[in-house]
Amino acid sequence: MASKTVQLEIKRQASPDAPAVWEKFELEWRPGMNVTSSLMEIAANPVTADGHATTPITYDSNCLEEICGSCAMRINGKARMACSALVDNLEQPIRIEPLSKFPLVRDLQVDRAVLFENLKAVKAWVPVDGTYDLGSGPRVFPQQQEVNYPLSNCISCTCCMEVCPQFNEETGFVGAATIAQVKLFNNHPTGKVFKEERLRALAGDGGIQECGFAQNCVEVCPKKLPLTNAISDVSRDVLIQKAKDFLRS
Amino acid sequence: MAAPRIIVVGGGLAGLAAVIKIAEAGGSVDLFSIVPVKRSHSVCAQGGINAAKNLKGEGDTTDKHFDDTIYGGDFLANQTPVKAMCEAAPGIIDLLDRMGVPFNRTPEGLLDFRRFGGTLYNRTAFAGATTGQQLLYALDEQVRRYESEGKVKKYEGWEFLSAVIDSKGQARGITALDLRTMELRSFPAGAIILATGGIGAIFGKSTNSVVCTGSAQSAVFQQGVYYANGEFIQVHPTAIPGEDKLRLMSESARGEGGRVWVPRTQGDKRLARQIPEAERFYFLEEWYPKYGNLVPRDIATRAIHKVVYQNGLGIDGQPMVYLDLTHIDRATLNRKLEGILDIYEKFVGEDPRDVPMKIFPGMHYTMGGLWVDVNQMTNIPGIFAAGECEYQYHGANRLGANSLVSCIFGGFRSGPIALEYARNLPAAEGDGGAAAELARQAEINGKLLKNEGTENPFKLWRELGQTMTEHVTVIRFNKGIKQADETIVELLDRYKKVNLSDRSQWANTSFAFARQLKNMLELSRVVAQGALLRDESRGAHYKPDFPDRNDEKFLKTTKASFTGDAAGPRFEYEDVDIQYIKPRPRRYDVAK
């Protein structure tokens, strides 16, 4: 009897300008397989299902336990982390494509630097005076910590941006991940010193008003961030800030 | 005089800590990292960070933290730097708190602490069970702030290949490879700090991330830096076995009351919950009544091996034991451990709040590393090292939640010292050796790309991982270690026939991997041969044929240096600094 196998179809592109092609692979099934272990298997034996030699697949990965945010890709049409995509839970053939909203590098690897640039634009940090010993930090009650901690769990995978209908070149929308970080830092007793600047950064084109409330972001987030709550809260704060700025001018 | 540029390689906790201190002191930094720094392996740390803040009224002190660390490390760590680290730890926690790390809190709004292995005090601050992620983000945010001020330039997606060393033997910069364009370049610097993490990949599957190959450490080792205590490898008692990696199940699960057990009867087929209390063997609690489930990792790992392989009591005859949290209420579990419980649920498909987890030990941490002096500088002037890639803080076994503090402390120390060193460094003669080093690297790259042969680098790597895991982890026999070393030599020979199935010059991951593999192989010999030579048992290094610690012969730091000979590295031994705490027998069945 033939042993159980796993069928994969992977979208390949040798460089940003090269044509895209689909390659099929057939791997021996093993218990506990996931998409990253399958890609590793192909690297060790880079041969397509019809026996043609090919190249190992280029993709981002690092921790393999869904905490570094590297291996986001589209699997059976859904943006998700490849490491936690267990083969046994996926319909076959498993179709794997790169994220579609970011510049393609090669195969399944894309360039997601835009998120890190967005984090700079909203000053997503607490401006400490220095790293020398200045005693303990501000008191934070557990109730506040329980609001902030989930927001701080964002792994920058960009799945929320991939699935957002408003995240595209036309709108220049920053996306849900950045907005959640604005809420996080505006909540912090010291971080809120930049609250107004952050809100103004989200007030213009590409800012928070681009959100169409499709709610795809919150559904796709692998770390279950309360993204739509964050967008509502920050939207309200941006409007208040706009009103204040208007009255002051 | 303009501030000299400092190169930091690695963007985990140690690297980012160094960057922050340099930028704060007015220096400029070029920061190199294979992955965007926010995706570095430090994110995988789960349970917490140690500091004797004594916020639980237990009378904890930094001296007790110091003693626990030295004792836990079986007296192999030099005591002066460990003492300094333990004394600095409370201040580091305060700083992280000020930076906005969402640590768990007490009802009064103060930092909460929990217990970890190898101590009887609640000394571990934590942010749920994703403390490493939260700490890394805090430092990443500070570095982003300096980046936006122009003090830091990031080279993300670049891989360090080698140090540039001038004719006087001083570091003058690095060579690195752009993993996208495959461009090879040299970068000048007044000093370089390596903060390149652990070497899990030489064991194939481990709890480490993909980038933790030890390639950078091995590269500078082959350029003349000593590698110290390579044989000390921590195998974490509780990992989830997997196809692509061994996923860590944090010690904090036990810190919060998790219990390790197996059925008392061999081959018991009942479901865990059907097995009554009296028929469960809580072997850690029975064997180590004082510390129970929170014995240090080397002890717990060997106990699990014994129960599985000697007593034949693994669950369903498999190499697995239960880690049980089901007696703790869901709300508490979610508040303190949600991150790791979600990981288990996602990868195993069972909810650990309802069903005991099935776990087994997995390679986890590299105690050894690049040899450095108390100033974090290696024996090559201008090459510094900080974090897991150096050897200083953990001796023969690291205590849980000491890694995050050692990474940040080492990074904080190395940054200003490297800057000071670079400020006093006379200008380089000519290019400082950059062109020659670049040519050497270009030749290696060219040869590899054109190489004809039949060996797949990923397959060679699997074989390396298998032999290292079999012979050079928990239980070590000299015969097996010799066999592992022979296998490595054979793999080095087969490496000459390595054939890249991809010869392109754009985002070629096989090429980058093949380069790392050569370095992994060279470093594996340091680990295996170091283990072979150390005929004693100490901390994580355990030889049944030499079951006792032998201070007379082996209370020494192992120092390996590269020879390029077929026989492998050269070994010498250095006395350990034991000026504060006199070595005493290490046992955990009773209070120290």
Image (tube, coloured by chain):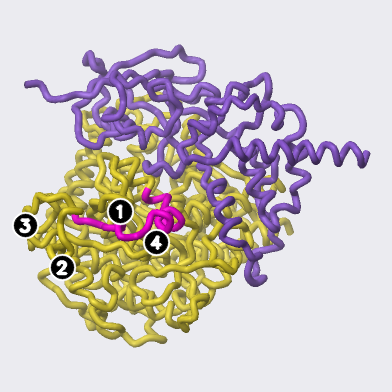
Chain colours: A purple, B yellow
Q: Secondary structure at mark 4?
A: strand
Please indicate, yes or no, whether residue B185 appears anywhere in the rendered image.
no
- Sequence order check, earlier mark of 2 and 4: 4
Label 1 crowd bin: few (<14), some (14–19), many (20+), radius 10 Å? many
Label 4 crowd bin: few (<14), some (14–19), many (20+), radius 10 Å? many
- Sequence order check, earlier mark of 1 and 2: 1
Chain of the residue under the numbered disc 1 shown in the image: B
Residue toward you, A167 or B77: A167
Is residue B285 shown above or below A230? below
Q: Residue at x 12, y 54 (%)?
A: B483
Quarter of the image with the N terminus of chain B in it: bottom right
What range is drawn magenta here? B321-341
To which residue does mark 4 refer? B370
Amino acid type at circle 2 is Lys
- Give me the C-alpha separation between circle 1 and circle 4: 11 Å
Q: Residue at x 47, y 20 (%)?
A: A15
To which residue does mark 1 refer? B523
Q: Position of residue A42 (x, y in %)?
A: 28, 28
